[in-house]
Amino acid sequence: MTRDTATPSSHCSCGSPLRWETRETYGEQRSLALCDSPDCGLVTTASPQGVQPEQDLELFLLGQTPARRYLNPWTRFYFKTTKWGFVWFPANEVCPACHSEVTAQLALPVLMERQTDPYLVVLCLACGATGIVWWLEERVAIAILGEDWNEPSTAVLILKRVLEERAAMAREDRSWDSLQ
């Protein structure tokens, strides 16, 4: 990657034309060019003074917005459910898949109108292995691997739907209580 802090040129150092792109935000303009030559492919930026060359591409793409770290789907699910008001507790057992001790369990109260909902969820925050337990005239448990969260399996989709619906029911109950 090269940096052109003066007037953006129209040709790369190899002689091929440059294709410029500009991003404009409030009070800021950032430019980046790619060499049209497939043999070269050099990236050129027109960055403000004081920006380190290794930060040029990051500055062009993100501006002043800090990069957010990637969170696995099960970790995003865990944090989302805590925002909805669900309380996870440390699980008693280590993860059967990766033997991590970073496991959490969520016990759901049995609701007469929702008897097909699971009553226990055990989640490994390290690898995403999940156990979901139902009581359907007998105890039924399924195990989900972390990769089942990437293209969510049916059990993951059901679990997400159940918790989202229960959170919505709790919000409705709280709003009803505030009216009385």
Image: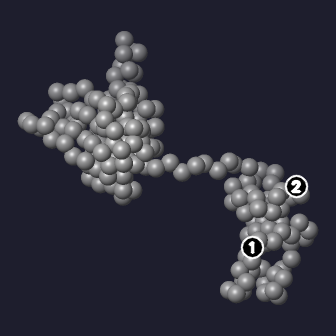
Q: Residue at x 34, y 39 (%)?
A: 94
Outermost residue on the front side: it is: 99
Q: Residue beneath label 2, please? A: 50
Residue 21 at x, y = what percent?
A: 74, 70
Res. 108 in view: yes
Tell me if 15 is positioned left or right of 121 in this view.
right
Q: Is residue 19 above or below residue 128?
A: below
Q: Nearer the viewer, residue 40 or 90?
A: 90
Q: Residue at x 41, y 38 (%)?
A: 102
Where residue 152 sits, quadrant-wise, is bottom left
Where residue 126 sits, quadrant-wise, is top left
Residue 37 at x, y = what percent?
A: 72, 86
Q: Is residue 162 above or below residue 51?
A: above
Res. 156 in view: no
Q: Say the numbered circle drawn on residue 43.
A: 1
Binning the other alpha carbons within 10 Å of mark 1 as few (below 14), some (14 to 19) or many (20 upward) gives some
Residue 179 at x, y = what percent?
A: 39, 15
The residues bearing labels 1 and 2 have C-alpha atoms spaced at a distance of 19 Å
Q: Are marks 1 and 2 in contact (CB under 8 Å)?
A: no
Image quarter in which the N terminus is found: bottom right
